[in-house]
Amino acid sequence: MDVRVVDVRKEFDRFPALHNVSLDINSGELIALLGPSGSGKTTLLRLIAGLETPTQGAVFFGEEDASQKTVQERNVGFVFQHYALFRHMTVLDNVGFGLKVRPSSNRPEKGEIRRRALELLDFVQLGGLEKRYPTQLSGGQRQRVALARAMAIEPRVLLLDEPFGALDAQVRKELRRWLREIHDKTGYTTVFVTHDQDEALELADRVVVMSQGRIEQIGTPDEVYDRPNSPFVYGFIGESSSLPVRMENGAVWSADRNIGLSAGDMPDGEATLFFRPHDVELLESSAGGCIVGTVVASRRAGGTRRVELEIGGGSDRIEIEVPAEHPAADKSSIAFKPRHWKLFPVQG
Amino acid sequence: MAPNPVKVRRRAGQPPRHSAVTESPGARLGLMAIAFAFLALFLLLPLVSVFVEAFRKGAGEYIASLVEPDALAAIRLTLTVAAIAVPLNLVFGVAAAWAIAKFEFKGKAFLTTLIDLPFSISPVISGLVFVLLFGAQSVLGSWLRSHGVEILFAVPGIVLATIFVTFPFVARELIPLMQEQGTGDEEAALSLGANGWQTFWYVTLPNIKWGLLYGTLLCNARAMGEFGAVSVVSGHIRGLTNTMPLHVEILYNEYNFVAAFAVASLLALLALVTLVLKSLLEMRYSAELAAS
Amino acid sequence: MTSIPVSSRAGWQMKKPSIIPGFGLTLGFSLAYLALIILIPLSALILRTTSLGWSGFWAVATDLRTIRALETSFGTSFVAALINVVFGVIVAWVLVRYRFPGRRFVDAIVDLPFALPTAVAGIALTALYAPNGWIGSLLAPLGVRIAFTKLGIIVALVFIGLPFVVRTVQPIMEEISREIEEAAATLGASRFQTIWRVLLPGLQPAILTGFALAFARAVGEYGSVIFIAGNTPYQTEIAPLLIVIRLEEYDYAGATAVATIMLIIAFMMLFIINLIQAWSRRRYGYGA
């Protein structure tokens, strides 16, 4: 089932949480909505589910305008960050709930509901735990139950709100891989919300990066990582260093130094240079076009050494990674050039 | 995360829930109507009727019923009893809460249960135990009597019965509050050189003052309004052992309804003041009051 | 070496070591006060009961008037607690979920029965529900009498029990996460199904506790009931009143026996309620 969000705006008490957002989700796709707190990602997910009504715009499931339907009629599987399991019901009753509350005309028989719930529990690798109550399960197990419960109604789309947010790091990684497997086996169109970029990049077919109620970039993990299209995306996804620079006649200047990068056909003016700290080339000599900085701090980080440099004797500081064996002595000078980089003109 | 919609909506005085998870407007109105009708019928109307009945024969009659000597004696006795019972239970409440909340010792759970005991005993039985203990038929009672000490059918008995029924109020408010606050503040004060009293006075007391006030308020309301227990031990001697609630009963049974409701209206006012103060405390210091 | 005996005794200590002073003073005072005010008087009751002897006790317990009074007390208390559960849950729901002008006032007024002296409540309810009262006069033409019947007792017990249910259920209701209801809605449950099959069962331990508290309070209630009850022996005479009557007849043995029976039944109930709660906590991981 493909899902289209068309020009949706959502205001809470005149405060806009989403500014006219549009998004096409293909059938069978696994999409991550990625962004910091307050970026509107959860609001967007809840609008698709029908848990919120848009102030303006519409949501389509296939050709059908789902905005006209209540949450009950939309038939979406929603998984909540804190599981939202019914604590007075057994695991089996939780999974079967969606089938039990159907109108009698299309409600399966009791035995059939039980059979399907057991089957789903097996599918999420919780066979044998059907008689337990939610409080008797670990966090990871609870989230599996929640997913089984959402899949029991054969939803048109699976929506997951920070599904691993309440779990510890180890379980989180495990479930991440497992969710991908489930998705590949079932083929449900799946949208999940996360603030964890690793999770989004590792899991999703496409990542939707959001900030302040707007979509910043939509793309595959490779696209958003390698070709961020805004300072926000550059800063938010992966590690980045940034340096204020000036563009003059196609050359890039930091303080009084031409740093040897080409501004291409960008107009003259103030800009910010973004690059990945690990993606730099160290130079022997500080002559010619390169960035030169004085080491102000250095610490060992795993297989590399992270160095904080002061640029141009001024207040600008950046971080780069150098090989672990590099001495990076205090106050010594390091010259380097970023291998991949991007310039964003300073607005206004 | 989206900006918290609940908070935003509450500020606007709107229902905090989204339409997907709330009742239809009709159902909502229906439930509110049932709730309001029930509360009006069972709570509000009786309260209003107290004042209506008290003024049935005009303000003159109302005032006359209150300044009559027996009424004044009852008011005086009620205030006296509360003035003795409440401070005693307050001191006990603080001491018990200190012992229970700040220390780990064997039998703590049992002690807590014992403190709650008067809540689960009928007021009449609370009075009965003192009759059995101090009555003329008991060894202790006749011994005390022969030495000229009157407890039953006298003020001491009324005070004892009142202390019994209001026993748990302050302790019950303070124990969870002080348990929640832990012992960190006290340990810090002690490590800075404060002695035990200084620690209590400058550190603990400011932390529990609102809870203490809250418990005292409820304790006082019950102490002034207690009927069953006091009724059993008082002997109903007009002008001597009649508290306000007992005076109300006597007047009512004499079919002197206006006077009965006039005295009752004073007690109702006390209840209203208690409710207002209680709400104010809850509104302003809810975080500092126990979650009970 | 002196520290060894101390640490080896650690398991036997009455109290865990602490640097905070005042344990002896506060515990000593608390225990002395508790003994003087509560334990010694209560033991007088127990002593008195044992001195009755089994046959004496049995004679009072099987006396028809005693049985009827206990039936009246427990029966009306049960009905009143049931009524309070239904309306108490609705009141709590309205207070927790809806925003309306005067909500603070309504919330405060729920505590009125805690604050209003029972005798005042008693005469006020009687004035309202007597055949010539505001409400009684409306019902009289329909042949419904409330004051001076068991219905009157129930009305008084509903009055005093209501806050117990509301104040027990309300905080638990406030804690229900919105996600639970949203989960039910996304699974296709109608609003009614969500309330009936998800929310109310989740509130069950709190409702049960509120019921038990209201019931226990109602069984012992005296002040608000005696005015409205009519107090006819064998019919509208409650057990606490029977105790008072026996005392006025100087029948201390009779009064003690009735009191003991009431206490035993009340404690049994509390015990059963505790069992149910412990069971609920073990099974669902939450009580109330």
Image (cartoon, grey):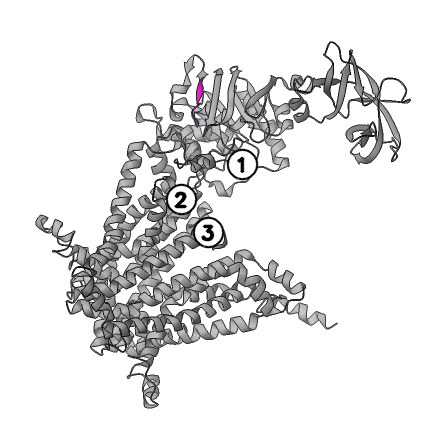
Let me know if residue A55 is in the magenta part. yes
Number of marks in picture: 3
Tell me the tag on residue B126. none
Judging from the image, mark 2 belongs to the subunit labelled C
**Residue to which mark 3 is pinned:** B284
Tell me the tag on residue C173. 2
The answer to whether C276 is drawn above or below residue A345 in the figure is: below
Q: Position of residue C166 (x, y in %)?
A: 35, 50
Q: Position of residue B182 (x, y in %)?
A: 57, 58
For the residues labelled 2 and 1, say whether their Cβ atoms are less than 8 Å apart. Answer: no
Quarter holding residue A52: top left
Question: Of circles 2 and 1, which is in front?
Answer: 2
The answer to whether B114 is drawn above or below residue A41 in the figure is: below
Q: Residues within 10 Å of mark 1 (few under 14, many from 20)?
A: some
For the residues labelled 1 and 3, say whether their Cβ atoms are less than 8 Å apart. Answer: no
Left or right position of B70 against A241: left
Single out the residue that lies furthest toward the front: B60
Q: SS class of the residue under badge 1?
A: helix
Q: Main secondary structure of the magenta part?
A: loop
**Residue to which mark 1 is pinned:** A141
On the rendered image, what quadrant is the C terminus of chain B found in?
bottom left
Which stretch is magenta?
Answer: A50-57
Amino acid type at mark 2: Met
Pointer 1 and pointer 3 on the same chain: no
Of A170 and A107, which appears nearest the observer? A170
Amino acid type at mark 3: Arg
Q: SS class of the residue under badge 2?
A: helix
Q: Is residue B72 visible?
A: yes
Q: Position of residue C18 (x, y in %)?
A: 62, 65
